[in-house]
Amino acid sequence: MTQELKIGLVSISDRASSGVYQDAGLPALLDWFSRTLSSPWQSVARLIPDEQPLIEATLVELADREGCHLILTTGGTGPAARDVTPEATLAVAHKVLPGFGEQMRAVSLRYVPTAILSRQVGVVRGQCLILNLPGQPKAIKETLDGVFAAVPYCIDLIGGPYIETGPETIAAFRPKSAQRPS
Amino acid sequence: MTQELKIGLVSISDRASSGVYQDAGLPALLDWFSRTLSSPWQSVARLIPDEQPLIEATLVELADREGCHLILTTGGTGPAARDVTPEATLAVAHKVLPGFGEQMRAVSLRYVPTAILSRQVGVVRGQCLILNLPGQPKAIKETLDGVFAAVPYCIDLIGGPYIETGPETIAAFRPKSAQRPS
Amino acid sequence: MTQELKIGLVSISDRASSGVYQDAGLPALLDWFSRTLSSPWQSVARLIPDEQPLIEATLVELADREGCHLILTTGGTGPAARDVTPEATLAVAHKVLPGFGEQMRAVSLRYVPTAILSRQVGVVRGQCLILNLPGQPKAIKETLDGVFAAVPYCIDLIGGPYIETGPETIAAFRPKSAQRPS
């Protein structure tokens, strides 16, 4: 029996969390995972303002108490003073995986030169992989499409469930020795 | 009325600052900005040796007291013992923007394999963007050409003036919502 | 007379160091350097488990007491809890060269999407360049092929011997002013 993947989704925005406008990040993330995963999963969502202590507490709660294997944040990765998502993520990290930030920026650069300004990081905390994504639904899809092939094997390596993806979506990549018969 | 952009230019070299040879970094930078910017700007320049405390003090003076919105350093980014520009820049940073270093190296790699050795970084201090550039005039031009499209929007986001570039140079890129009618 | 290059080779693996399987990293490294270098060199090798204090002590011994100009580690760069090679390398670093990690990941990405997960770094300690490589012989060759052109000039800059490579292997790249007549 396959263990269910638990995904934490955290939308970080002063204006969306105070109701000034409708959050678009959480629906974009739910839509993307619904299309991509073929193995069982559930999600838990949070919508919070750009406050570093609150972001850190939310990530810790989702990883340590909720038992999420994967957390996606959206928003708060730019150069403005209120953008503190990467700082909060690094503050709760056990290991930093620089390849995720590099590759997400490289992918976004194919679309906009200002992708350079995104400071997003990928880290491991315990048995949970945390990835910062941009705030715009279009950019969320582009960056997840660009890096997700490596996520299932990463979650294997940190002790999480074996994730499978649908045949017409992102092909999960694993070395042969780590593949299970389907 | 458009606020004038204030640019700090810092050439960092033991030999140029002691008169052993003529500094080529500051003229290359002035030339590049003269060709590129169409909105009003002024510059303030410094020529200093590779001493970390002095580099830090110079960056702080230009950002905090001179009110520069953008600082470009040239020189001191290699692996040699006297190369300490990135360390000084990180020491005065409020936010690090890893995309600038990544992209400047990726651009330089199209020209020379030793671009890997450059440790240049981009950071924000208050309302000032600080970028480390290489020391050679040719490499200064190549890296500025490669990343400058993202600089005007970055300066918007940290609270600086609205920069415009000439029609036949680097096209400043901004999302539609951030563009002003010209 | 050319000074001899001294290379430290460190294979980091719980299972290989305890005899569960045969180490393949050190033979792959020796083979690669035998094919590549045409100037005189010698090597010193270590096979150790994934213990951060032991990795740090081994790197310090090879750099400071054995006088290695170049150290290559293999293994321990992934996201798993026992993978601590990058942490140990950063702990003994005097300078970090982010371009090596970026470029090794970019090169490996041409072969496997999970290259994103490698956390390998390049650093300088005193007059020694330390590079983390992946564990698999195939990936060792791919990443060394991808970045070695910049290594000889880096070793020049930190005060080591002048390295030369064979005519049909990796061409060492140096600016003209740093080239010696052959």
Image (cartoon, coloured by chain):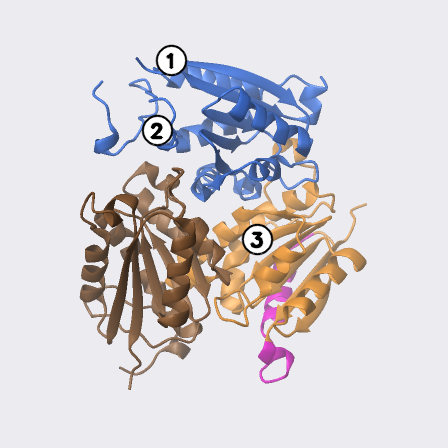
Chain colours: A brown, B blue, C orange
Q: Which residues are magenta?
A: C14-38
Q: Is residue A174 visible?
A: no
N-terminal of the two: label 2 or label 1? 1
Find out whether the residues at labels 2 and 1 contact each other: C-beta distance under 8 Å.
no
| Residue ID for mark 2 | B156
Residue B72 highlighted magenta (yes or no)? no
Q: Relative to A45, does residue B129 appear above or below in the rendering?
A: above
Mark 3 vs mark 2, foreground winner is 2
Residue at mark 1: chain: B
| Residue ID for mark 1 | B40
Secondary structure at badge 1 equals: loop
Secondary structure at badge 3 equals: loop
| Residue ID for mark 3 | C169
Residue drawn at x 25%, y 64% is A170
Instruction: Name the kind of residue labelled 1 in the image.
Output: Pro
- The quadrant of the picture occupied by the C terminus of chain C is top right
